[in-house]
């Protein structure tokens, strides 16, 4: 049993080092994997090209529209209600209302602020 484990460990070490003997069914496996990887890599590289009508700018605009649209307004209402309730029950100081108001102004005024500072249309 010990001799068998030693032989198996030596074969694994030789395979990891790339010096394994090419006998049996595994002799074609390593070159086949390399050829397959070489054929597939250009396809993966081509997948990164932006094609069709969806540009990264359109994707970013859609995300901003989602955040600043009805979903964002709903989240803002929940945030105001949660902070108001926490202040009402005494679990949070009233300064949190100021931070919440500042955050809402920055989030929902971000489009105006960026247009004002950077310009554009």
Image (cartoon, grey):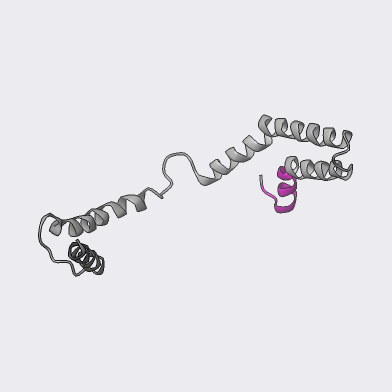
Magenta region includes residue 24: no
Q: Which residues are magenta?
A: 110-120
Apparent side of residue 52 relative to residue 59 in the rendered image (left or right): left
| Residue 102 in the image: above or below residue 35 | above
Q: Quadrant of residue 108?
A: top right
Q: Position of residue 19 (x, y in %)?
A: 19, 70
The mark total stands at 0
**Residue toward you, 47 or 11:** 11
Q: Quadrant of residue 13?
A: bottom left
| Residue 13 in the image: above or below residue 49 | below
Q: Residue at x 69, y 34 (%)?
A: 72
Instruction: Pick the quarter of the image with the N terminus.
Output: bottom left
* Extreme residue in the left direction: 23
Q: Position of residue 27 (x, y in %)?
A: 13, 59
**Residue toward you, 84 or 101:** 84
* Extreme residue in the front direction: 1
| Residue 54 in the image: above or below residue 46 | above
Q: Main secondary structure of the magenta part?
A: helix
Instruction: Pick the quarter of the image with the C terminus.
Output: top right
Magenta region includes residue 118: yes
Apparent side of residue 90 relative to residue 46 in the rendered image (left or right): right
Q: Residue at x 21, y 66 (%)?
A: 6
**Residue toward you, 99 or 104:** 99
Q: Residue at x 14, y 57 (%)?
A: 28
């Amino acid at each position: 049993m010990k001799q068998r484990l030693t032989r198996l460990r030596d074969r694994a070490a030789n395979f990891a080092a790339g010096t394994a003997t090419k006998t049996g069914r595994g002799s074609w496996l390593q070159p086949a994997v390399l050829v397959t990887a070489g054929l597939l890599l250009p396809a993966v590289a081509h997948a990164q090209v932006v094609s069709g009508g969806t540009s990264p700018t359109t994707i970013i605009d859609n995300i901003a529209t989602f955040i600043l649209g009805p979903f964002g307004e709903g989240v803002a209402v929940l945030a105001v209600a949660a902070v108001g309730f926490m202040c009402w029950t005494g679990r949070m100081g009233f300064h949190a209302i100021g931070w919440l108001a500042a955050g809402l102004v920055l989030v929902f005024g971000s489009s105006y602020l960026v247009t004002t500072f950077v310009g554009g249309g």
